[in-house]
Image: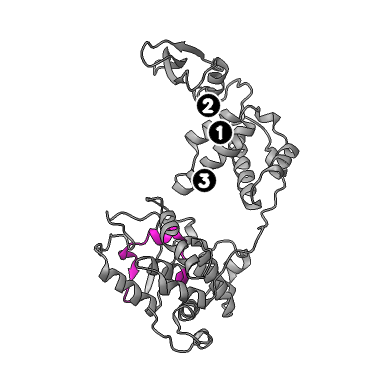
Amino acid sequence: MFSRQRYQFGSLARKERKKAGDVWEFRYYERTSDGRPQRRAIRVGDVAQYPTRADALRAIGALRLRINPDGTSIGPVTMAALIDKYLEEELPERHCTRVSYGTLLRKWIRPRWSDYQLEQVKTVAVEQWLRSLPLAPKSKTHIRNLMHLLYQHARRWEFIDRNPIELVRQSSRRLGIPRVLVADEIRSLLSVLDEPYRTMVLVAVCLGLRVSEIMGLQWGDFDWDNLTVLVQRSVVQGRVGETKTEYSRRPLPLDPELAHALLRHRARSFYTGEADWVFAGDSGRPRWQETILRDHIAPVAVRSGVGKVGWHTFRHTYSTMLRAIGTDVKVQQELLRHADIQTTMNVYTQAVSEAKRDANSKVVRMVLAGPGETNRAAGGGPAVNGS
């Protein structure tokens, strides 16, 4: 007859060490392949990190969940234990997502809710807490969504039957309108930027790429004969990862003017192989976008009178220019590689590649046109080589 294994709580012990200081040790039993119990021990941390036994007990919640994978006769689970289990087993691989989730958990969710049992977290209490945070609505929405994700995993692991975050209301409405630049401001900024930062900004505003995608470009991504570029990866803080979404991995048209600017940059570069990074640093590795913005682009923008800019300013600018020239909404979606316009638009409407190329080229000509030629460029007149 099948014997159901009882929930194993394990034990916490303080282990003395003469030189390095005492440590807390979690002790439990693990079944061997022949079914015999074998004693195991895991170091929880030193006494300096967890001064009291109560502190150490709060830290072993996730360890207890790990040694009881089937959840047999499981007792109350705390948010701290759920967070630790999520970080260990379910945290997404994409680096920027891991950093973002880790920050939200460490700075906001864990300090407020870690000692609560899962059943004790109530919908209205979470709403009131979010309302009190000194954050933008979009940041509060990120926190709300991450808490919802934690509870969904708790349901999958059968720690709880319901998700109290499902009914939490949190608006993601922006407090302000995102900054966008006009063509004259872009040209003014390009005229004072040094290389390679000028070419980076040119790519950002003429292709609408996310900065992680710009840092992830390699020379082999370009098809110079057919004038296209395939976005295949992203780089965040020097770490290579996947693009933000699968929809982001789409080929884009490359205007001849922008292609010439990139080839000129390649001629100046030391790293020109197909597998080399387009905007490699001195070591050949990808640069850090935060450092580039802080030290090279943002200060120049302020000094030149353009004002405050961020990397996403250029993507917003590209999107605004596409709308300004009357680009079909489906073409906009394909050029920006968004996956969330409208289901019917995504399913039933197909953008013609020539329409995408024409819309993209009009934006490039607006950026690179000389003074007084913006209107003619937007209307499809001949481009002026401002590269």
Q: Position of residue 222 (x, y in %)?
A: 34, 69
Q: Position of residue 170 (x, y in %)?
A: 70, 49
What residue is rendered at 66% in x and 51% in y?
137
- How far apart in space, not on screen, are marks 2 and 1 (Cα)? 8 Å
Is residue 182 shown above or below 62?
Answer: below
Q: Please tell me the numbered disc located at residue 100.
A: 3
> Are dots 2 and 1 in contact, CB under 8 Å?
yes
Disc 2 secondary structure class = helix
Does residue 62 appear left or right of residue 79 in this picture?
Answer: left
Q: Nearer the viewer, mark 1 or mark 3?
A: 3
Taking the image as drawn, is residue 232 in sight?
no
State the quadrant of the C terminus.
bottom left
User: What is the three-letter code of the residue carrying label 1?
Assistant: Ile
Residue 216 located within the stretch drawn in magenta: yes
At 31% across and 57% down in the image, what residue appears? 281
Q: Residues within 10 Å of mark 1 (few under 14, many from 20)?
A: many
Q: CA distance from mark 3 to mark 2?
A: 21 Å
As shown in the figure, which amino acid type bears the numbered disc 2?
Ala
Residue under circle 1? Answer: 83
In magenta stretch: residue 153: no
Task: Report the residue marked by disc 2.
Answer: 62
Task: Say few, some or many: other residues with alpha carbon within 10 Å of mark 3 (under 14 / 14 to 19 / 20 or more).
Answer: few
First to last magenta residue range = 205-225
Tell me the SS state at disc 1.
helix
